């Protein structure tokens, strides 16, 4: 293994090793709970990364798709009586299908219009879930019972860890595939991508559907972990959260979504001790980060590393 | 993008700037007008250093740019566009009237179109409005960036005449053109730019007979 | 730019560092402690309601600690309240309760919103994380699921539906429109009230429910309900928005009566909009009227919080004292099941120390607390001192 | 029929507030291309300032209104400086700055005034009855004052030098710089006017309902819907869109379903944008 590879994979392997034994190094139940949520949200943030980071379309509907996944699972298991895993797969597919329908409408618009259309969609989903008592249980919400195997918190932790790794792998494959290059071409220069023969709308929709599928997956896991679902799971504030996680971590980077989610979510949880003031401080931090570090933590570290490596090379060359 | 460009324009002169697309003509114009901050070098107007001043200060000093893409206010009427042209100068009503008169005399069609929205004018009319708007601030130096771009030959010819009239009325003009034939036919001196540098300079006649220029810009 | 960036980075790091430092330092361990949890709406339309509950518990805890805490054998435990805001949203409530149970180790969690209590019933019997729910709601359904770790002190709302109907019909009102709050509580109430109303021969003219926790202007809803020309409106949710509903209905020229669901308190509403606007409101009597011990409590309360005492504070205060007695009688602060089982043994609770009376408890957790109703007539509370021992009339 | 007119008046009342808030947003978007998501929070803050002045200090209502508007014109200047570093960056950066700002404001208000609902005493609770319509005088004042403010704004933009500068910058920022308009100054002015308008709307409408730290969350969403519907940056679009949405909402409560009252606007918007991707009234792209 070369030094370059060691730098590249060393951190990852170390993190993975820690992650594998996390429940057994004496952390509290509460801490484990928080980490499970952070894992689930980082899947959602990774899903946002596909459409926003790689394809350049800022979607404010990720919270809605998270909710559709969760409610899909709940309805399929509770109302239709489906097997849990089957229901989970179907719920994700349904989410992707809704993504297709919304994508067909929304991708007719661009830039700020697209942001607002997706936000409106999220709002509609929230209000519908809140009021459609028969299907969603309305404000009361509904219960979700997972398989017996995942009744324990530790088991759910490993389940989520597995899905985080799977999603990470998918992201890695996408960023290196032809489709992924197509996504980025659309992000960087739409007219040029068009000229190169990339079907813009098709590319956006494919990216959106993958993104929705993963957001739905995160929703399913969230519902399973909480054991209870209410309209808050589809709130547009969730979408805001995912965007904040992504921007703090670094949009368009592989590890950015995970780093951002864990940093922000854990920090906010730890700061719960000082009450709601934490949001005030968080707000100021957010503004400073966006102004001075627009590429997020991972993006910032990357350029820092490049600078260091660059100067070292220059020294060696001289 | 610009690299050691040196050029000067004397008062009352019409100087042209030639060069292919992307040679740096527009950038040069925008730098003089204060839209782009230069990383080095100096711009001197009437013995005063105006380097790095903001665009609004430069207009007040008497340099007006009529930009390549016109940058009119499409959803405002023609007359409003003109009055905004004098925004920097705080003219009183009498001077404003003189300015309107001068603009309408030069381009009578603008008087007819006074209440029409600028965005609904034809391409040629829009170009006229853009030039007229730049003249509203009574500039000492008018920078004209590609006024003939995308216009029909007849319109181009009329614009050419108007430029001559503007110079005759006492305004110094720096004209940037891809269409070297027209530019050289009315200017007294010229510069040729290539990839951000001035590669040739001289009076218009000698430039017009230069074999390189002929080959590259006159298509002969 | 570079220096600015460094400064910004410094500021950010300092802020985060400072925060984490303050948070880790507050986790010091003092004498033995028992943590009581509360998940309630502490912001939005239900904030006042949630805060009233919280204050009752707080006052009880103060009294308990002044008295030497919870005494079990030779040990004594200081009581500490840990409250979290759930905005009356079930999922937030579940996450709060999990947090209170696992992180703070709370074995008793107070919750005053039915919509949130229902999901809590699904998690409070989970092994090693059990907690006793002190359900401050009048929706009897929460005890129907056979959950063994629930105590519900207020009278079930079904006590009121028939009484309210009778009182309203006596005024000659027969047409009712419903503009109550959304959610499990509001829906159950509307259903129960509708049944009682129709059984007594009344008609329901319109149903326009609104979310009392988030709406700020009820005029469009009221216009819809009033268009059906009702004699009386069923309204209710937290007191504060309910008061606004009465005020707005009167400003729209409505001259009929109001049946106020029991979450909203007539005296609390009068405090908001003035007694003169409360004319023709039928609802739960002011807490001070039926219970002789309450005025003393009310005075202490007023001194401490500079606000009028409410049922929420009075009942939650009594419930907290009840739980303390139960803990001592069960000789455990750790085992919610033992605490629950000790509750019947310490009842009844009545006398000068208690602002309200708790007479008994049924097997499912429903407690016996007498109540009283009132109707505002000529600026006066009528009927308000007649206690209703509802469980004695149960069939 | 009188029921229809009653709800229509309700809708116009709502629409007046929507229009005033949306106007500010559309001005800001037109000038800077910034999605100023914290705009609603300044509306909320305006309501709390009026509450503070009139309830805690006993300042008369109209004086409190004028003070609030004046204060918020100054606050607007401050907002501009927060946005300046991200002005020419991507849409989402400004959006995040806005989120940061609104978190700070909301928590600050919670810290000062608590989390519960508050009320400003209705200065004109007199009830008017005409043609079968019943409404409080204050509602009529909201409708009238909104019209006055909209006319004043129109005159300001069409008749004054500064107003033309705003329009010029909105339509072509580079062109404006070339004729000697200071884009920075215009952008400060715009934020000042927009924030002042929001404060005015808040001061007018706040006595009619509760004020709370989260009162403006849906309002700002709706204001965005309105300006997108009307074409981003279009003043006419914002005014018409505001009244249209208000009336639509009131009629939806009356004739379709109160529970879904907030949905129709958003659904209509998605459909309209799918057919006309640049909004009903065109607007800049």
Image (tube, coloured by chain):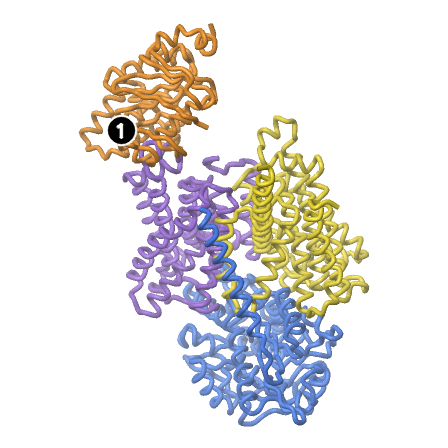
Residue, x 63% and y 34% (percent of image)? A201
Q: Colour of chain B?
A: orange
Q: Colour of chain C?
A: blue
Residue, x 46% and y 45% (percent of image)? D86
Q: Nearer the viewer, residue B170 or C234?
A: B170
Residue C347 x, y percent position in the rendering: 65, 91
Q: Colour of chain D?
A: purple
Residue D133 x, y percent position in the rendering: 41, 57
Residue A18 x, y percent position in the rendering: 72, 60
Which residue has dot 1 on it? B62
Mark count: 1
Q: Residue furthest left?
A: B94
Quarter of the picture containing the C terminus of chain C is bottom right
Residue B155 sits above or below residue A204 on the image: above
Q: Quadrant of residue B67?
A: top left
Left or right: residue C76 compared with residue A167: left
Residue, x 45% and y 36% (percent of image)? D283
Residue, x 47% and y 58% (percent of image)? C11
Q: Is residue B77 visible?
A: yes
Residue C256 x, y percent position in the rendering: 47, 70
Chain painted yellow: A
SS for callout 1: loop
Q: Residue furthest front?
A: A318
Left or right: residue A183 compared with residue B189: right
């Amino acid at each position: 293994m070369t030094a370059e590879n060691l730098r590249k994979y060393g951190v990852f392997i170390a993190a993975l090793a820690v992650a594998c034994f996390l429940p057994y190094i004496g952390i509290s139940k509460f801490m484990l709970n928080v980490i499970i949520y952070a894992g689930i949200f980082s899947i959602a943030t990774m899903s946002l990364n596909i459409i926003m980071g790689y394809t350049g379309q800022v979607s404010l509907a990720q919270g809605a798709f998270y909710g559709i996944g969760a409610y899909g699972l709940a309805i399929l298991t509770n109302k239709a009586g489906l097997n849990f895993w089957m229901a989970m797969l179907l719920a994700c597919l349904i989410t992707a299908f809704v993504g297709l329908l919304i994508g067909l409408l929304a991708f007719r618009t661009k830039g700020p219009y697209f942001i607002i259309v997706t936000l409106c969609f999220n709002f509609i989903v929230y209000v519908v879930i809140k009021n459609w008592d028969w299907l969603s249980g309305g404000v009361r919400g509904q219960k979700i019972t997972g398989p017996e195997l995942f009744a324990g918190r530790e088991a759910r932790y490993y389940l989520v860890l597995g899905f985080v790794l799977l999603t990470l792998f998918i992201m890695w494959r996408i960023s290196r595939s032809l489709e992924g290059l197509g996504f980025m071409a659309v992000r960087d220069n739409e007219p040029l991508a068009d000229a190169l023969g990339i079907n813009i709308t098709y590319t956006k929709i494919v990216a959106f559907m993958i993104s929705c599928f993963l957001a739905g997956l995160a929703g399913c896991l969230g519902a399973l972990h909480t054991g209870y679902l209410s309209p808050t799971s589809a709130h547009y504030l969730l979408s805001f959260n995912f965007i904040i996680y992504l921007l703090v971590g670094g949009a368009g980077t592989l590890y950015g979504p995970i780093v951002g989610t864990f940093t922000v979510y854990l920090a906010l949880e730890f700061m719960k001790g000082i009450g709601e003031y934490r949001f005030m401080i968080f707000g100021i931090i957010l503004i400073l980060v966006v102004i001075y570090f627009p590429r997020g933590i991972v993006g910032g570290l990357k350029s820092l590393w490049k600078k260091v490596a660059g100067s070292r090379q220059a020294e060696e060359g001289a | 993008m610009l690299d050691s460009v040196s050029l000067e324009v004397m008062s009352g002169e019409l100087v042209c700037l030639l060069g292919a697309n992307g040679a740096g003509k527009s950038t040069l114009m925008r730098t003089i007008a204060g839209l782009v901050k230069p990383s080095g070098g100096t711009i001197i107007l009437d013995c005063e250093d105006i380097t790095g001043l903001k665009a609004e200060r430069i207009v007040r000093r008497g340099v007006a740019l009529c930009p390549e893409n016109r940058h009119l206010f499409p959803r405002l009427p023609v007359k409003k566009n003109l009055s905004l042209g004098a925004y920097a100068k705080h003219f009183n009503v009498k001077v404003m009237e003189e300015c309107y008169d001068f603009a309408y005399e030069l381009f009578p069609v603008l008087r007819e179109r006074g209440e029409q929205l600028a965005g609904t004018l034809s391409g040629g009319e829009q170009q006229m409005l853009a030039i007229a708007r730049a003249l509203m601030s009574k500039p000492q130096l008018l920078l004209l960036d590609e006024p003939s771009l995308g216009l029909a030959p007849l319109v181009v010819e009329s614009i050419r005449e108007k430029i001559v009239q503007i110079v005759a009325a006492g305004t110094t003009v720096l004209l940037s053109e891809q269409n070297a034939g027209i530019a050289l036919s009315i200017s007294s001196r010229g510069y040729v730019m290539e990839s951000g540098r001035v590669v040739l300079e001289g009076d218009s006649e000698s430039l017009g007979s230069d074999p390189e220029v002929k080959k590259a810009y006159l298509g002969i | 730019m570079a220096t600015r960036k460094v400064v910004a980075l410094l500021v950010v790091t300092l802020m985060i560092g400072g925060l984490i430092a303050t948070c880790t330092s507050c986790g010091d361990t003092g004498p033995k402690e028992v943590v009581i949890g509360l998940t309630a709406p502490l912001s939005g339309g239900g904030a006042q309601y949630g805060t009233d509950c919280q204050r009752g518990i707080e006052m009880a805890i103060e009294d308990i600690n002044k008295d030497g805490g919870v005494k079990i054998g030779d040990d004594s435990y200081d009581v500490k309240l840990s409250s979290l805001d759930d905005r009356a949203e079930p999922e937030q409530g579940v996450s709060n309760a999990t947090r209170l149970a696992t992180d703070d180790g709370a074995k008793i969690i107070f919750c005053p919103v039915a919509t949130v209590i229902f999901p809590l019933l699904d998690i409070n019997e989970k092994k090693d994380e059990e907690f006793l729910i002190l359900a401050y709601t009048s929706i009897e359904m929460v005890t129907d699921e056979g959950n063994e770790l629930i105590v519900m002190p207020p009278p079930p709302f079904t006590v009121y539906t028939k009484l309210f109907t009778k009182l309203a019909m006596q005024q000659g009102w027969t047409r009712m429109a419903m503009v109550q709050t959304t959610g499990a509580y509001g829906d159950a109430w509307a259903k129960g009230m509708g049944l009682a109303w129709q059984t007594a021969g009344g008609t329901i003219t319109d149903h326009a429910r609104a979310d009392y926790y988030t709406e700020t202007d009820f005029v469009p809803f009221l216009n819809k309900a009033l268009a059906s020309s009702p004699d009386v409106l069923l309204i209710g949710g937290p007191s504060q928005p309910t008061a606004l509903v009465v005020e707005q209905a009167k400003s729209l020229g409505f001259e009929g009566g109001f049946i106020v669901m029991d979450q909203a308190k007539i005296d609390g509403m009068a405090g908001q909009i003035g007694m003169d606007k409360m004319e023709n409101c039928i609802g739960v009597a002011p807490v001070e009227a039926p219970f002789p011990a309450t005025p003393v409590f009310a005075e202490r309360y007023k001194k401490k919080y500079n606000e009028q005492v409410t049922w929420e504070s009075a009942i939650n205060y009594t419930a907290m004292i009840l739980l303390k007695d139960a803990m001592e009688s069960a000789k455990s602060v750790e085992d919610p099941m033992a605490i629950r089982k000790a509750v019947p043994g310490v009842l009844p609770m009545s006398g000068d120390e208690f602002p309200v009376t708790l007479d008994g408890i049924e097997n499912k957790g429903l407690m016996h607390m007498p109540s009283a109703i009132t109707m505002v007539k000529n600026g006066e509370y009528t009927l308000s001192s007649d206690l209703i021992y509802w469980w004695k009339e149960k069939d | 029929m009188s029921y229809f007119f009653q709800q229509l008046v309700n809708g116009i009342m709502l629409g007046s507030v929507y229009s005033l808030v949306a106007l500010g947003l559309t001005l800001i978007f037109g000038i800077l291309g910034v999605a100023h998501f914290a705009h609603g929070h300044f509306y909320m803050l305006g309501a709390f300032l009026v509450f503070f002045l009139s309830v805690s200090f006993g300042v008369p209502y109209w004086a409190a209104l004028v003070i609030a508007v004046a204060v918020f014109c100054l606050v607007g200047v401050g907002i501009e400086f927060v946005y300046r570093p991200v002005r020419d960056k991507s849409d989402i950066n400004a959006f995040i700055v806005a989120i940061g700002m609104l978190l700070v404001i909301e928590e600050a208000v919670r810290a000062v005034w608590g989390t519960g609902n508050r009320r400003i005493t209705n200065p004109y609770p007199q009830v008017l009855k005409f043609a079968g319509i019943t409404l409080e005088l204050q509602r009529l004042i909201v409708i009238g004052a909104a019209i006055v403010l909209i006319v004043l704004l129109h005159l300001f933009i069409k008749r004054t030098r500064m107003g033309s500068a705003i329009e010029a910058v909105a339509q072509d920022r580079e062109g404006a710089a070339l004729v000697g308009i200071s884009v920075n100054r215009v952008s400060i002015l715009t934020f000042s006017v927009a924030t002042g308008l929001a404060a005015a709307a808040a001061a007018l409408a706040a006595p009619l309902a509760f004020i709370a730290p989260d009162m403006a969350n849906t309002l700002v969403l709706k204001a965005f819907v309105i300006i997108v519907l009307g074409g981003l940056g279009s003043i006419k679009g914002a005014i018409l869109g505001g009244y249209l949405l208000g009336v639509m909402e009131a009629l939806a409560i009356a004739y379709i379903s109160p529970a879904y009252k907030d949905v129709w606007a958003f659904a209509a918007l998605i459909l309209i944008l799918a057919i006309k991707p640049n909004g009903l009234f065109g607007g800049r792209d």
